[in-house]
Image: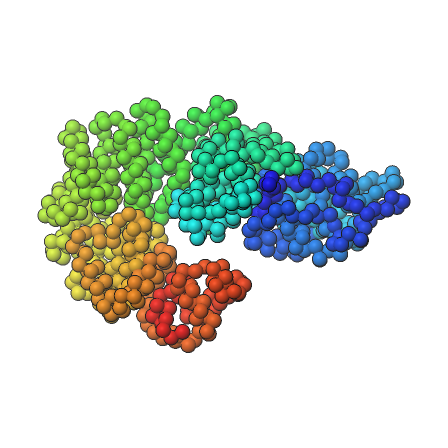
């Protein structure tokens, strides 16, 4: 079966049907004829030839906009599903328009002077007088309650805007729904951007049960079955299908083209060939407009509709990976373009759906779909400007991370963490460029970027990523003595130690000492001693660790490198605590906290608060320890540091166990374990801490029983980081609230729903299990949350474990 664009999706400009063949039933004798009333539902909408996938939110929102506005425009890049959504919306609301819903297709129209004639033909309006067709249309539509769907307006958008303005002013009962790659830009228009279909994250494992929840996967599967009737999603092909949908940006047109290739290829072969997606995705619908029969022609169509400056900026902006901000675009791509002109061109590319505007708080960023980015990069390469743009890109992001490093210990730290988190794809691109290009200058820049990112990676517990980049850059850069190489060796050793890879850490420390001996300067020696001291700390050689860290502190005490001092002070605090010298441990942590307080720092402060809490916990001051752990946890939420957060959750579990809150302790242990594993580390950073974990787990298991303990710990493991932090910071919620919320407060049906939630079932799965509507299932879940005063499904699961026998 030939694929059609899916809806979530058009064939975006559906010229599958001749407007002349659909108007039918006209009176040839009338000078001005109306549509026949004998055709059933009035109008000329085509029947759907394939199933409509997803778009529930967009359909509801567009329906709401159409109820409030007389002109609604669905915008988006070609192949995203504008036409299909418009047709589904029109079919949904056709009963509201007694004079019909009429489709006007402009995909093949180039001559703007013919626009009114095309609209008249679609409506079946014939007039033999010499009057302008526009006047005839106004007379015909006056007082008719009618919805006009004008599809694919972009190539004649000015003419469509003018005609729509005229008709809407003169015809009070008329409503117009248009599809275009940019809004019409006239008063009263309500525009809705049609996004790609939801697709899985290619960097996360995909399960057979979870994949059908993504509309892009559902579309691929349905079209695959049309091509190969025995196709099914299986454990063996889920990963490939997920990556295909992700690589194609959730765009329905290329997804359908890819599914059609299953007649001759496996999903794995399709995935392998997506590196040349334009060559692969050529098997389109023969009835579709020519520009939509292949992916390249579809994008060529969008490119041809851009001005020369828009085309040039499209190519230049393809140098960005992920998203970018205006300051980066100006510095990298706009050196020869006036600021105001570049801003206007970026806005125009947003209007034309080449760029996607995203806003988070006060920050606006722009994103280009990978399919469009590949197209722009190819044009950039052909024009001969790729190398220069990549060097500018590298230099700008190099400067960004150096500035972030210089202001790391400051009140701006959280802003820098957030900015660097947003820029990760671009930073990876810059480092990859440094590695791939030859020359000492390139390698040196890559080394400096990685070194400057060390503290960001540390703050976000991105140990594996940081280690991977440092290893690659260290192995490809010259082994000549330099401070940057010393810092890189130190950073890599820290990540290996945290991850428990002590042999790798030992090798890095040995290389540090050899390099320091060549350099023969105090800073290099201090860096090597610091790395060696941490190795001793993690390997259990505490006396050696203490001596080496004190040696490093003597040198860095007079240095302006506050980050290094904070790391050493925290390391010494752990060393003294392990030696049971609590007085010195407290002194070191208080010194660290004084620095963080003075400079408005958050990341190191959160770790120092946790470590100080651990000391006072061991001194028997439980309430003070709780306060410190909770203050630390609050900061980890701001920094978004899952490892320090996990250590805080673990420590609060110990306190809950001592307080007799066995269920709370089990939930917190589960959450801590999950977040420790998520960063490939452990919440027990030092071997001596294991006994507290073991005591807490044994006590909770004995109190609850094995089954209840396992269920509570499992509930903790399923929490998001935000849910776990909220749970831990609510001192009254876990046990006191759970004991006061009586099971009888739930109805029998709500009890059934609560148990299914505890089994990890989605609203859709619950609806299927109970044979009720999904919306009804959602309502039951919301009632359960409201009655129990909870905010997450994980809390329901934990509560059911306690009260399961009552329902």
Residue 132 figure quarter: top right
Q: Residue at x 10, y 45 (%)?
A: 544
Residue 227 figure quarter: top right
Query: Which one is in front, 226 or 133?
Result: 226
Residue 284 appears left or right of 144: left
Give the number of callouts: 0
Q: Is residue 186 visible?
A: no
Expressed as whole percent of the image width and height from the top left, the position of residue 495 reads 25, 42
What colouring method underlies this structural image?
rainbow
Q: Residue at x 26, y 49 (%)?
A: 681
Q: Is residue 99 above or below residue 395?
A: below
Q: Residue at x 42, y 32 (%)?
A: 393
Expressed as whole percent of the image width and height from the top left, the position of residue 582 reads 14, 57
Expressed as whole percent of the image width and height from the top left, the position of residue 44 reads 73, 47
Expressed as whole percent of the image width and height from the top left, the position of residue 173 reads 75, 54
Q: Is residue 125 visible?
A: yes
State which quarter of the image contains the N terminus.
top right
Q: Residue at x 62, y 56 (%)?
A: 64
């Amino acid at each position: 079966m030939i694929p059609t664009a899916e809806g979530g999706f058009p064939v975006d400009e559906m010229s599958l049907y001749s407007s002349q063949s659909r108007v039918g039933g006209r009176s040839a004798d009338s000078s001005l004829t109306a549509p026949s009333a004998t055709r059933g539902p009035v109008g000329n909408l085509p029947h759907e030839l394939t199933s409509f996938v997803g778009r529930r939110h967009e359909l509801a929102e567009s329906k709401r906009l159409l109820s409030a506005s007389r002109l609604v425009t669905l915008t988006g890049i070609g192949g995203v599903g504008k036409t299909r959504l418009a047709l589904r919306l029109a079919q949904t609301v056709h009963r509201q328009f007694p004079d019909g819903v009429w489709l006007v297709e402009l995909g093949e129209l180039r001559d703007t002077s013919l626009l009114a004639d095309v609209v008249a033909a679609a409506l079946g309006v014939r007039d033999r007088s010499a009057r302008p067709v526009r006047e005839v249309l106004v007379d015909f539509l006056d007082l008719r309650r009618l919805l006009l769907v004008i599809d694919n307006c972009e190539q004649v958008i000015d003419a469509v805007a003018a005609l729509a303005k005229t008709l809407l002013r003169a015809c009070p009962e008329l409503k117009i729904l248009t599809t275009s790659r940019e809004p019409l830009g006239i008063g009263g228009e309500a525009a809705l951007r049609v996004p790609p279909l939801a697709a899985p994250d290619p960097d996360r494992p995909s399960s057979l049960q979870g994949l059908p929840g993504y509309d892009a996967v559902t579309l691929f599967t349905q079209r695959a079955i049309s091509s190969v009737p025995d196709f099914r999603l299986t454990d063996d092909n889920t990963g490939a299908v997920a990556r295909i949908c992700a690589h194609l940006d959730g765009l329905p047109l290329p997804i359908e083209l890819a599914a059609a290739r299953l007649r001759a290829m496996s999903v794995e072969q399709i995935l392998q060939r997506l590196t040349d997606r334009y060559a692969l995705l050529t098997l389109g619908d023969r009835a579709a407009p020519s520009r939509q029969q292949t992916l390249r022609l579809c994008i060529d169509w969008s490119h041809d509709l851009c001005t020369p400056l828009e085309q040039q900026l499209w190519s230049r902006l393809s140098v960005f990976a992920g998203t970018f901000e205006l300051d980066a675009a100006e510095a990298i791509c706009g050196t020869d373009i006036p600021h105001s002109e570049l801003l206007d061109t970026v806005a125009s590319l947003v209007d034309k759906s080449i760029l996607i505007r995203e806003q988070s708080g006060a920050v606006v960023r722009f994103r280009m779909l990978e399919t469009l980015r590949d197209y722009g990069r190819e044009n950039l390469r052909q024009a001969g400007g790729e190398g220069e743009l990549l060097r500018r890109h590298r230099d700008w992001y190099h400067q960004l991370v150096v500035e972030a490093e210089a202001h790391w210990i400051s009140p701006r730290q959280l802003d820098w963490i957030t900015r660097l988190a947003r820029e990760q794809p671009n930073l990876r691109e810059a480092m990859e460029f440094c590695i791939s290009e030859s020359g000492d200058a390139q390698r040196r820049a890559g080394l400096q970027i990685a070194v400057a990112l060390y503290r960001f990676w540390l703050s976000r517990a991105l140990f594996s990523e940081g280690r991977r980049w440092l290893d690659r850059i260290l192995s490809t850069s010259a082994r000549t003595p330099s401070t940057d190489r010393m810092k890189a060796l130190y950073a890599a050793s820290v990540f290996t130690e945290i991850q428990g890879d002590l042999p790798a850490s030992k090798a890095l420390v040995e290389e540090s000492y050899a390099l320091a001996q060549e350099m023969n300067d105090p800073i290099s020696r201090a860096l090597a001693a610091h790395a060696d001291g941490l190795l001793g700390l993690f390997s259990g050689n505490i006396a050696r660790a203490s001596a080496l860290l004190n040696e490093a502190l003597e040198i860095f005490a007079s240095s302006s490198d506050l980050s290094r001092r904070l790391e050493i002070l925290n390391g010494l605090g752990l060393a003294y605590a392990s030696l049971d010298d609590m007085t010195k441990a407290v002194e070191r942590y208080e010194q660290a906290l004084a620095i963080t307080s003075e400079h408005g720092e958050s990341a190191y402060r959160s770790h120092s608060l946790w470590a100080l809490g651990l000391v006072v916990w061991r001194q028997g001051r439980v309430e003070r320890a709780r306060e410190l752990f909770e203050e630390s946890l609050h900061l980890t939420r701001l920094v978004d540091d899952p490892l320090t957060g996990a250590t805080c959750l673990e420590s609060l579990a110990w306190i809950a166990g001592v307080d007799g809150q066995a269920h709370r302790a089990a939930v917190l242990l589960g959450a801590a374990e999950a977040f420790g594993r998520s960063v490939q580390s452990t919440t027990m950073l030092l071997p001596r801490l294991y006994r507290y974990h073991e005591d807490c787990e044994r006590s909770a298991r004995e109190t609850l029983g094995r089954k209840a303990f396992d269920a509570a710990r499992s509930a903790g493991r399923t929490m998001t980081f935000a849910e776990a932090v909220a749970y831990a910071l609510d001192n009254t919620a876990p046990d006191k609230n759970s004991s006061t919320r009586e099971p009888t407060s739930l109805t029998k049906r709500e009890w059934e729903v609560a148990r299914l939630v505890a089994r990890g079932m989605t609203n859709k799965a619950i609806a299927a299990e109970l044979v009720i509507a999904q919306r009804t299932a959602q309502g039951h879940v919301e009632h359960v949350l409201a009655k129990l005063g909870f905010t997450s499904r994980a809390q329901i699961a934990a509560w059911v474990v306690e009260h399961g026998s009552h329902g």
